[in-house]
């Protein structure tokens, strides 16, 4: 009889007994996620708050409660796992950003975004590293070698894409959104290249050849990652257009889009590319082609389901970061010398601000030089917002700091403990203070942003139910209404992006859309009876 | 410089390097999921195949390829994890089944379902255990004690809800679907009660008091699990109705429904209840109340997104079971004596068939006795289909067998190895043969099933885009059109279920719907501008 009990016990173990502590944690965590959504909704009218700060505060409060209940032993609910973050939480957020980004804005500012993401991150990383070397030597924080300082530079140079999505509104400030968020995406590629460069090249004697190699490897990585995303997106469009023509099934279409988007991210990881870049471009291609090949209900479903997944992943991250901030083990070392920790955090915050200022203003100036039209130039007030909105450091910085300064989640060296607590302080302070101040700052500096709802009809964002205008002429797509036909080479030189748009549109209409579908190229059969019958089978 | 490399390496490790083998596995697995969807679509017109058999076959083929490529060392891509199955894959499947079940059919056959799920499973378990004891003693399969035999009974008595969903079509055979699937859901509660009973009571001397205690604890568990699901569902309806009234946001509504459904499952695990039962009833309540309180686009999104999650989880399970069937370690012991393994598998298959026949036909007879109308009785041909469609054993049996007969995934005892391989054989054989034969059998025995599309307007299943009929009279809900007002106690005795329906509808309209919303009780504002503005903020 014992073994029979053991069998049933073991089934129950999985369900409840052995991992009962983790079941309790999961319950609490899911309940807190619900609470964040409800509280976030209630605070929606508030001009200061946003969802991420709500989640961060709820996480902090929960951490305090757990700390008190457990008698100062623990503030953890879940163990922070980089796998969880990079493999499960980040992909849906970045994919959804690509899926719902305003493509017109993004590609019009492409060169500026590349400047910020590649050159800017390098500048910022150098300044923070050098600043840390100079200033930390005066403070007693234990032994840190040159590698640690360069690591600090890398940790605090990364713009957090997730934070950006929370504080900037794509409809209110489309230019700023595309610049700051685009920078965050390109930034990921930069860090992979940095790693490869340091590993492959001898950096002790820098000469033009090394710089050229560095540039080439960045270009290679950027292009291959982008191509992988584009190819996966096109493949999904092709499969859905060819196979599902005339007999659509929403469940399979949605499942295929979701799986292929995830596949693009995992393939990039497989080939040591930048998964963030890949899945971002996969999202863009899917919104341009695949999304128009699926049924009406699939369009509504994918649009909202991808947004919801991204939304839940974002809250999850901020809730976790807030909850993890009070981990008692890390603060034990620091409690002896609170002054040192405050000093280190303040220096780091100052360096982050200086490092970002050192590239935003010069690079904006450079970018403005290349633009003729005054409406396209980045004004000084907008530069301030770009500088400010990119100051936040979030879960990516946390993940990197944990990885560098802890071994298996435990902190034993004093210097490492101080770096961890300082990172937490910087993340909390920057997210709360800079995050809270962004909305009012934008309102103060740019008092009349024009909401651009529905200006880009190819973006899933602007869909309405019932879907109208599906069959209308698709030529106003990438800003077609304001693209005059260039009459000469002179036109190409004066309005390069517009001309590129024009020829892209011609190419798109002539070659891409007939093969991969897209708006206006897939005949729409309203209420097609095949949809229901094929759907019912796969409930 | 080393540590800087280490930092960046460690970031990459997470992304690619250290777990590169698991990244390869995940890529292959996601690609196979996509392949299953595409192949399943291509084979849709085939009268024999269904998605589960396709996934099983693709899994088997992949297993063979991996076995050949790795030189006979491994056929694994992912290690089978019961956590993965019970915590992540099963809840969405069961929730979606509850969300899209035909409530009218389900509640009309409630007593029969309870009979099958509770009494039937007990009968089946006893017969299989006794049969195994009698027959295995003649075969040399190593030492097995009485506990092992009872475990075999429990493993093979469980109807697999996931298989049922695949072979029976709710629209074509609603009665059979609700009976067989409902039995699978109630079955889960029975096994939890069995465990509690064996743990708490002294079963050596069975007397009426023990039986009464057993019955009471089953009733307690069934009622508390159901109540938990109902309460969570009502809570979600109340929160969405109260808070989001007039300013809906699809992302938050969908996220809240998803999280609260999952919370109900986890809460059941927390309180040692039946999570499957809880999440099933949560799905029913959510489809009756919550689903009608959300915006139009949320309705489309939730309906399809829940169905898609369930669909992907099902394919995932079958793909895995197919892939795992060739695990070389288990077959090594068996290769010495293939005859024994075949004998054990055949005996088990025969016992499964006899055990199921032993309760389906007598209990159907009992159930028919209580019904006056000949149209409500379960005909003999239908009994055969019920018997046949419940013969499949799937991932639940696999998970239980692994748990019982292996330690940490490795099989060392010969008897245990034979039991594992026999379980795999039974699962593969029953899914393929019984699964393949079910569609033709139904067509042969029940040649003219009437598809009942759109007969139950409260079920998300039947929604069309654009959503019509939202504001129509809600009184035809639970079969209201065929419920005559009972004029006396006599009516209550002759048509008990109809009368229960009538009073439930009165109660629902008078008390429940005004509080929790539901069809016709939430004013619908088409194209409400608040939806878009609030949505945009949370992209």
Image (spheres, coloured by chain):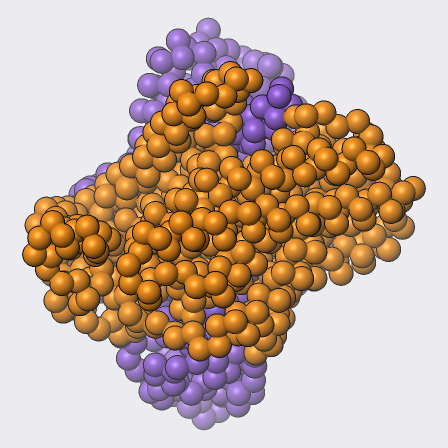
Chain colours: A purple, B orange
Give the residue drawn at x 43%, y 70%: B172
Q: How many numbered marks have been drawn onto this rendered protein structure? A: 0
Q: Is residue A58 visible?
A: yes
The answer to which quarter of the image holds residue A43 is top left
Instruction: Reply above or below: B129 against A294.
Output: above
- Percent x, y of residue A409: 57, 23
If the image is split into quadrants, where does the N terminus of chain B sit? top right
In the picture as drawn, the residue positioned furthest to the top comes out as A336
- Percent x, y of residue A390: 40, 46
- Percent x, y of residue B37: 58, 66
Give the residue drawn at x 22%, y 52%: B496
Give the residue drawn at x 33%, y 19%: A65
The answer to which quarter of the image holds residue B63 is bottom right
> Is B75 situated left or right of A338 in this image?
right
Q: Is residue A116 visible?
A: no
- Percent x, y of residue B184: 48, 47
Give the residue drawn at x 11%, y 49%: B489
> Is B468 situated left or right of B383 in this image?
left
In the picture as drawn, the residue positioned furthest to the bottom comes out as A487
Query: Looking at the image, which is closer to me, B201 or B67?
Result: B201
Query: Looking at the image, which is closer to me, B317 or A197?
Result: B317
Query: Looking at the image, which is closer to me, B292 or B472?
Result: B472
In the picture as drawn, the residue positioned furthest to the right comes out as B336
Instruction: Reply above or below: B373 against A187.
Output: below
């Amino acid at each position: 009889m014992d073994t029979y009990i053991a069998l049933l016990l073991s089934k129950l173990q999985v369900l409840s007994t052995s991992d009962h502590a983790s079941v309790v944690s999961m319950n609490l965590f899911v309940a807190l996620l619900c609470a964040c959504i409800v509280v976030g909704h209630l605070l929606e009218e508030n001009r200061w708050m946003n969802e991420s700060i709500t989640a961060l505060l709820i996480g902090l409060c929960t951490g305090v409660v757990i700390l008190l209940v457990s008698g100062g032993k623990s503030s953890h609910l879940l163990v922070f796992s980089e796998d969880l973050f990079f493999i499960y939480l980040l992909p849906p957020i970045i994919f959804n950003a690509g899926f719902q980004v305003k493509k017109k804005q993004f590609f019009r500012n492409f060169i500026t975004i590349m400047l910020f993401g590649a050159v800017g991150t390098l500048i910022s990383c150098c300044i923070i590293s050098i600043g840390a070397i100079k200033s930390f030597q005066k403070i007693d924080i234990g032994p840190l070698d040159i590698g640690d300082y360069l690591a600090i530079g890398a940790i605090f140079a990364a713009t957090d894409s997730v934070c950006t999505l929370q504080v900037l509104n794509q409809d209110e400030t489309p230019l700023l959104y595309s610049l700051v968020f685009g920078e965050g995406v390109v930034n990921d590629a930069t860090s992979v290249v940095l790693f490869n460069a340091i590993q492959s090249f001898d950096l002790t004697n820098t000469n033009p050849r090394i710089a050229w190699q560095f540039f080439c490897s960045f270009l290679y990585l950027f292009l291959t990652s982008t191509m992988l995303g584009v190819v996966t997106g096109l493949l999904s469009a092709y499969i859905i257009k060819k196979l599902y023509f005339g007999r659509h099934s929403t469940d399979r279409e949605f499942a295929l889009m979701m799986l292929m988007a995830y596949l693009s991210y995992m393939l990039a990881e497989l080939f040591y590319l930048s998964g963030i870049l890949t899945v971002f471009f996969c999202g863009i291609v899917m919104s341009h082609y695949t999304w128009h090949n699926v049924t009406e209900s699939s369009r509504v479903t994918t649009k909202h389901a991808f947004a919801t997944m991204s939304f839940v992943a974002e809250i999850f991250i901020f809730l976790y970061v807030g909850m993890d901030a009070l981990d008692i083990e890390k603060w034990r070392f620091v409690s002896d010398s609170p002054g040192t920790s405050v000093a280190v955090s303040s220096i780091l915050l100052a360096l982050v601000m200086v490092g970002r200022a050192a590239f935003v203003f010069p690079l904006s100036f450079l970018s403005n030089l290349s633009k003729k039209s005054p409406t396209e130039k980045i004004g000084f007030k907008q530069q301030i917002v770009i500088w400010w909105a990119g100051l936040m450091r979030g879960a990516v910085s946390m993940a990197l700091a944990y990885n560098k300064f802890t071994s298996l989640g435990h902190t034993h060296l004093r210097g490492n403990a101080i770096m961890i607590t300082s990172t937490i302080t910087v993340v909390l302070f920057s997210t709360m203070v800079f995050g809270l101040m962004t909305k009012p700052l934008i309102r103060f500096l740019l008092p009349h942003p024009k909401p651009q709802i529905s200006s880009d009809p190819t973006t899933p964002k602007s869909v309405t139910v019932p879907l109208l205008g599906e069959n209308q002429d698709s030529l106003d797509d990438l800003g077609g209404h304001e693209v005059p036909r260039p009459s000469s080479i002179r036109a190409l030189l004066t309005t390069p992006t517009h001309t590129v748009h024009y020829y892209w549109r011609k190419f798109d209409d002539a070659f891409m859309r007939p093969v991969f579908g897209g708006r206006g190229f897939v005949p729409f059969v309203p209420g097609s009876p095949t949809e229901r019958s094929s759907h019912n089978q796969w409930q």
